[in-house]
Amino acid sequence: GRGGGLAAGGGGGGLVETPTALLTLHGGEAVEIQAAPAGTICAARGLKGVATGDTLLLRPKEGLGALRLPGVAVPPPVFFCAVEAEAASQQPALDAALAALRLEDPSVAVKNDASTGQLMVGGMGELHLEVLLQRLASEWQLRVHAGEMRVAYRESICSAVRRTSTHASQLKEGGEVRIEIEVRPLDLADGAGAASQEGPQEAAAVQHAASEAVRSALTRRELGHLLDGMRGAAAYGDLLGFPLHAARAEVSSVTAPRGTSPEAIGGAAAEALSQAVAAASPVLLEPVMRVEVQTAEQHLGAVLSELTGARRGSVEKLLTPSDALRQTVLARAPLAAMVGYASALRSLTAGEASLSMEFSHYARVEPAVQQQLLLQMRGYV
């Protein structure tokens, strides 16, 4: 019944709340009910700390408080854009609206870009972000300016590097923090589907570590700042500021003058990681999509030619149903090359084809394409 307290596990972090109403939904109509027996699909109103994917328990018995059902699998955002309120006075309302949208839709990512100061919003596609911006206007009456929608690339490294970096200790007496760090690439498959909840620029699929000697030498607070500094640096790559992906960084030695603050150690770790990544042959990674196209047989040749040519895709399988009226093409293609493909597909097939895409993995950008991207995003083209 609605009078019972619900314990939320997952993002709710064990929070206990009481819903103000239980509702069954029939199309656009909501009907209030007094109880929800087993098997009922219903909505609970008034839960403020519960997010999509949380597990709700009614008065959990001893030993069941940690029960968690599998949450919603959220792939990383593949498009992002900068947004800003039309007036500075609307910024708090914009922040609140985006926070509400994130509770409802975990695939929405929001973060402040430390390098530019812009508010970045990430999503699963151009249409996803367009709908989000429309909802800000229609549901929250917010007028926002949105920047150009861009693909959410990642960055990685090609070689292992071990180096020792020195950094000012920030003490009046002077002195330096000396950090020895090693970075090395991981197999891209290790982080192929790693998702990030922190935003379009947040580091994902990066391993941060400190050796046993470092863990023994530092206090818990100093170690926390060391690892936080590494995570912060991994959120902004050397080439274009995209998050580092499929890499491991380990600090093997830290030497600092007595009295050095934990914050200074964290800042030194961030600088050391950034310098090591810059020396480890950084490369761009691009999101690759799993593509499924269903089309009539007479259009199959045109669809295959477009996918493997201009779209830089690779066809993995052709499925032919028993009636042979429609063919199904399963392929993988870089997201950057698939922008506008839905419209092109309609033209190729006279509107008779269907298309679905979902995130597959990150892959290294071809050298020629990477060079063009670097020139374009740095403003030289």
Image (cartoon, helix red, strand yellow):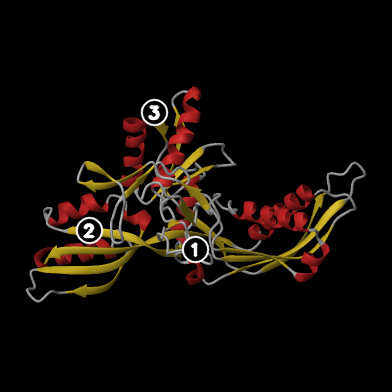
Does any portion of residue 170 appear in the rendered image?
yes
Distance between the alpha carbons at the discs numbered 2 and 1? 47 Å
Q: According to the image, label 2 marks what residue?
A: 355
Residue 39 picture location, percent across and down? 28, 61
Please identify the quarter of the rendering in which residue 179 is found.
bottom right
Numbered disc in front, either 2 or 3: 3
Would residue 283 appear left or right of 310 to someone viewing this image? right
The amino acid sitting under disc 1 is Lys
Q: Is residue 228 above or below residue 119?
A: below
Residue 27 picture location, percent across and down? 19, 45
Say which element carries label 1: loop
Q: According to the image, label 1 marks what residue?
A: 61
Q: Quarter holding the C terminus?
A: top left
Distance between the alpha carbons at the discs numbered 3 and 1? 45 Å
Tag 2–tag 3 contact (CB < 8 Å): no
Numbered disc in front, either 3 or 1: 1
Does any portion of residue 200 appear in the rendered image?
no
Residue 197 picture location, percent across and down? 49, 53
Q: According to the image, label 3 marks what residue?
A: 142
Say which element carries label 2: strand
Q: Which residue is painted at 68% across and 53% down in the image?
A: 229
